[in-house]
């Protein structure tokens, strides 16, 4: 009998306790509100000045971007990608470190490296990308990176890149030149 | 504003009795339907907002394009309703089509015709029957037929579970609800809704309003038994086992979509209002003002009645967003082992009380 | 009076169902509301994790381990890194060990918050779920400043970490803990000690210790049955032996030892203990270079290793066979959620429909890890 009434008492008191908590939350909504109203407000992204000693540390996960003028075609990013979403085609240039304006090829990267290869295809399928960031670390020229964050001076952040067609998610970074034009500059040894 | 008054008021009442009757009924029914629709929109909006505030979020806040939602998302329920109307009405291939189509309306009718006997104000009642409260309790249990029909005709195991659970639940909870009402009827000596409210005018010792809930300790307990049984009859959390979304997907309503689903939704909210209105009428003084003589005119009566009903609906919403759900056998054991003995003791207690004090 | 035996009804719970925590299918034979047989059917989320790993290099496996137990990616990375380090006999710097423990315990809190929140949802309480998600968000924010990702981190690498801690990270973790620890009391008041919740969970789905051990159940599920078994204490890896913390076990406070409530409550107390570990680790955090011990090329010597760690779900182990090449010859993951699910059929017989959902929720499974 005691148990019966005790059960009823415990039930009522614990329910009242729970209801007092929700009540408190309801009247303190102005203070406790955690909603971000998305299109108007956005999630604060990690700042560029995040406290790393090395500026090159990339701690953002967003769309991959390639500064194709800096790319030397070393294929390191292609090899390290666990899902093989990066596709690169390179051909050996005839002369090392020479600007080839009519196919938009720059000979020397911003780090001063002389390019030996012409990158004729550099595609990243962002629908396959798993945002693991692994391609970013081995790049010797720091030309592949995720946009925004510490790289926002190179490219503004872009994490909303939905498309109607899946093919539109394949980002083509290489200069759009036909193969005939490129073949003029390709090293004779390979030919 | 009763049907009888209208019939008498019509100049051609005697010549075409059927036409007069139908016209009078439609004149009374249309405002009620509009009232339910508008009230449901308000209640849905309130539920969205209150639940959001309780959960530290802002709820519908659309300031978007078109009718999507106006400032503070006020038009959100309208948009929801429009969406439900525009949606395809899917009837499963293997469903029992006639029953499937019929079920939502049966549920809705159960809630709808209860409004006929609700006293919104001193003179605002559609049918002031001398058996008002009995009538409401009787037609209120009509909705269980609709839910069983829905559960059976969907030809879906989840729906069948939901229908069976709801049958067991609603019928069981009718008993403590009815028994608590009996204790009120013993006090007031009338089954008429207006009669019960008139009994509650005035004050106790000049301080407390002379509401039945304050009349004696037994009716105080009876109020809670009735109200909680009412929550169970509306299938609201913590008693929402017929549509327990984490177990039965959506219970009896799993296969419904579009307008038919909207009718279930509408009748859930309508039933909430009916339960609150009965509780207000029977225990909280109906349209009587809480302070005797203060704002007690006929117009203010509607205000007080709505205020009390809506605060009970708020209580139901508050329950829902705080408590977990009971299991089906626990629900039954609460009904039969707690509420039923208590309401029987209440009847006894009220009888003794009115013998000694009244 | 004779007993009427009807036919049993077969009911499919899932794969599309609100509370199967992913794409799990439960083939249930019911007698009305009473469940007489439960058969979990898995494989709807199979992604060939182990086979896939035989084709990618050791460092490329780490993003895949993220996706196994996607609720606690840090712990998965941690287990994998520890295993390869043991195989290659790499000694990682002190700072790396500390940071790993901080992030792993933070992720344990995040994972338990999700488990408890969805458990509340399973028994019908909606509001605690959102409160717990609100606090889990704060941990994810911390991780976002740490490595840019909110769910799949790829942060703990073999021999080190991908980044050092950002500036102010230590302070923000402290402020998070100060904010979070009082919240546990609120959860307790709102859900744990709610009478309806106790009715729904106490005495339900009792998992006796001997059954748990014979099925290989580990982690909070085993500790809920009163067995004091935690890899962090019993087979310490990394530097867990340096910290002072308790292993909570189920005591049958509300019912029988090993019921759903005990499993739930063990997780609740474990969050407090994790917070304790994080505080100690943050105070003792040494300086150093996190990249110091990163191997240039991960090429473990010929041989095999089996190493277990304590993930939020229990005993997470990797078995790796190396043939000396940069690609694993064979990789096997022992998933704690798999063994936890296997016990479901055993302990949910004779309970009701709603209880099966409650028992399943209390086991805290992650289908990504079961199907792999």
Image (cartoon, rainbow, N blue to C red):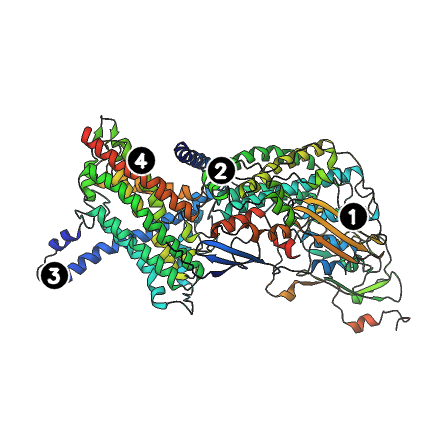
Tags 3 and 1 touching, CB below 8 Å: no
Q: Which residue is mark 3?
A: B17
Q: Is residue A146 visible?
A: no
Q: Which residue is mark 4?
A: B221
Quadrant where the image shows the C terminus of chain C: bottom right
Using the image, tell me which numbered label, if any, was put on residue B303.
none
The residue lying at 50 percent from left, 47 percent from top is C121
Q: Residues within 10 Å of mark 4 (few under 14, many from 20)?
A: some
Q: What's the distance in space between the residues labelled 4 and 2, CA to CA?
A: 25 Å
Give left or right: position of C304 versus C186. Answer: right
Q: Which residue is mark 1?
A: C158
Q: Which residue is mark 2?
A: C190
Please tell me whether mark 1 sits on a helix, a strand or a loop. loop
Please tell me whether mark 4 sits on a helix, a strand or a loop. helix
Q: What's the distance in space between the residues labelled 3 and 1, CA to CA?
A: 92 Å
Tags 1 and 2 touching, CB below 8 Å: no
| Residue B113 in which image quadrant | bottom left
Q: What's the distance in space between the residues labelled 1 and 4, CA to CA?
A: 66 Å
Q: Is residue B115 visible?
A: yes
Q: Nearer the viewer, residue C103 or C140?
A: C103
Q: Nearer the viewer, residue C254 or C67?
A: C254
Tags 4 and 2 touching, CB below 8 Å: no
Chain under numbered label 1: C
């Amino acid at each position: 009998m005691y148990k019966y009434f005790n059960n009823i008492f415990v039930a009522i008191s614990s329910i009242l306790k729970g209801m007092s908590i929700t009540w408190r939350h309801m009247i303190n909504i102005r203070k406790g509100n955690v909603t971000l109203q998305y299109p108007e407000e956005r999630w604060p992204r990690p700042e560029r000045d995040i406290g790393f000693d090395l500026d090159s540390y990339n701690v953002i996960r967003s769309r991959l971007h390639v500064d194709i003028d800096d790319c030397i075609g070393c294929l390191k990013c292609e090899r390290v990608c666990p899902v093989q979403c990066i596709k690169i085609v390179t051909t050996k240039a005839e002369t090392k470190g020479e600007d080839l304006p009519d196919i938009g090829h720059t000979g020397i990267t911003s780090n001063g490296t002389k390019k030996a290869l012409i990158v004729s295809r550099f595609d990243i399928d962002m629908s396959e990308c798993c945002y693991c960031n692994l391609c970013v670390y081995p790049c010797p020229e720091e030309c592949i990176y995720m946009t925004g964050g510490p790289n926002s001076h190179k490219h503004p952040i872009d994490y909303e890149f939905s498309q109607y067609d899946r093919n539109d998610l394949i980002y083509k970074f290489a200069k759009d030149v036909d193969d005939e034009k490129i073949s003029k500059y390709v090293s004779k040894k390979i030919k | 504003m009763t049907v009888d008054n209208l019939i008498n008021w019509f100049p051609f009442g005697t010549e075409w009795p059927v036409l007069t009757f139908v016209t009078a009924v439609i004149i009374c029914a249309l405002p009620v339907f509009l009232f339910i629709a508008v009230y449901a929109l308000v209640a849905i909006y309130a539920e969205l907002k209150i639940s959001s505030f309780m959960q530290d979020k802002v709820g519908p806040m659309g300031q978007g394009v078109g009718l999507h939602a106006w400032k503070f998302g006020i038009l959100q329920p309208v948009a929801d309703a429009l969406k439900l109307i525009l949606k395809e009405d899917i009837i499963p291939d293997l469903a029992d089509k006639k029953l499937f189509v019929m079920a939502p309306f049966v549920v809705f009718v159960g809630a709808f015709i209860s409004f006929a006997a609700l006293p919104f104000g001193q003179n605002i009642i559609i049918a002031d029957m001398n058996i008002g409260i009995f009538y409401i309790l009787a037609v209120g249990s009509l909705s269980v037929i609709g839910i069983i029909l829905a559960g059976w005709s969907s030809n879906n195991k989840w729906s069948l579970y939901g229908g069976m659970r709801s049958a067991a639940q609603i019928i069981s909870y009718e008993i403590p609800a009815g028994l608590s009402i009996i204790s009120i009827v013993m006090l007031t000596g009338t089954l008429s809704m207006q009669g019960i409210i008139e009994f509650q005018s005035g004050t106790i010792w000049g301080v407390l309003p002379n509401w039945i809930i304050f009349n004696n300790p037994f009716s105080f307990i009876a109020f809670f038994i009735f109200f909680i049984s009412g929550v169970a009859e509306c299938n609201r959390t913590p008693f929402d086992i017929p549509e327990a979304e984490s177990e039965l997907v959506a219970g009896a309503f799993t296969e419904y979509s579009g307008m038919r689903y909207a009718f279930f939704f509408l009748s859930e909210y309508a039933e909430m209002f009916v339960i609150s209105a009965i509780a207000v009428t029977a225990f909280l003084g109906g349209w009587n003002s809480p302070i005797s003589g203060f704002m007690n005119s006929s117009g203010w009566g509607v205000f007080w009645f709505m205020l009390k009903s809506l605060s009970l609906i708020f209580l139901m919403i508050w329950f829902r967003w705080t408590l977990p759900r009971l299991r089906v056998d626990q629900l039954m054991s609460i009904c039969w082992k707690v509420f039923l003995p208590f309401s029987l003791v209440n009847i006894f207690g009220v009888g003794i009380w009115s013998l000694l004090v009244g | 009076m004779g007993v009427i035996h009807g036919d049993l009804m077969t009911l499919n719970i899932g794969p599309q169902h609100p509370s199967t925590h992913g794409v799990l299918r439960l083939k249930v034979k019911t007698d009305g509301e009473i469940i007489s047989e439960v058969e979990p059917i898995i494989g709807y989320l199979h992604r060939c994790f182990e086979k896939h790993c035989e084709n990618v290099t050791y460092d490329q496996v780490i993003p895949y381990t993220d996706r196994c137990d996607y609720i606690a990616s840090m712990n998965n990375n941690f287990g994998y890194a520890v295993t390869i380090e043991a195989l290659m006999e790499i000694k990682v710097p002190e700072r790396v060990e500390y940071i790993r423990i901080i992030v792993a315990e933070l992720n344990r809190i995040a994972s338990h918050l999700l488990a408890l929140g969805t458990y509340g949802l399973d028994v019908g309480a909606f509001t605690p779920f959102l409160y717990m998600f609100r606090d889990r968000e704060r941990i994810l924010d911390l991780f976002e400043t740490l490595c840019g990702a909110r769910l799949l981190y790829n942060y703990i690498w073999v021999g080190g970490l991908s980044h050092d801690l950002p500036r102010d990270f230590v302070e923000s973790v402290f402020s998070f803990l100060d904010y979070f620890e009082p919240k546990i009391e609120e959860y307790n008041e709102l859900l744990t000690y709610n009478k309806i919740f106790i009715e729904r969970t106490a005495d339900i789905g009792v998992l006796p210790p001997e059954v748990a051990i014979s099925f290989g159940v580990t982690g909070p599920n085993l500790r809920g049955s009163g067995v004091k078994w935690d890899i962090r204490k019993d087979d310490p890896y990394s530097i867990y032996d340096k910290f002072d913390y308790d292993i909570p076990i189920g005591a049958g406070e509300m019912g029988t030892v090993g019921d759903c409530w005990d499993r739930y409550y063990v997780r609740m107390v474990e969050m407090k203990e994790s917070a304790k570990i994080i505080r100690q680790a943050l105070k003792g955090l040494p300086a150093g270079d996190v990249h110091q011990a990163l191997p240039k090329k991960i090429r473990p010597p010929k041989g095999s290793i089996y190493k277990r760690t304590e993930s939020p779900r229990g005993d997470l182990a990797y078995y790796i066979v190396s043939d000396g090449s940069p690609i694993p010859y064979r990789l096997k993951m022992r998933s704690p959620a798999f063994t936890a699910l296997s016990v479901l059929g055993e302990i949910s017989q004779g309970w009701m429909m709603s209880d099966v959902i409650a028992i399943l929720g209390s086991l805290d499974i992650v289908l990504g890890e079961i199907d792999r």
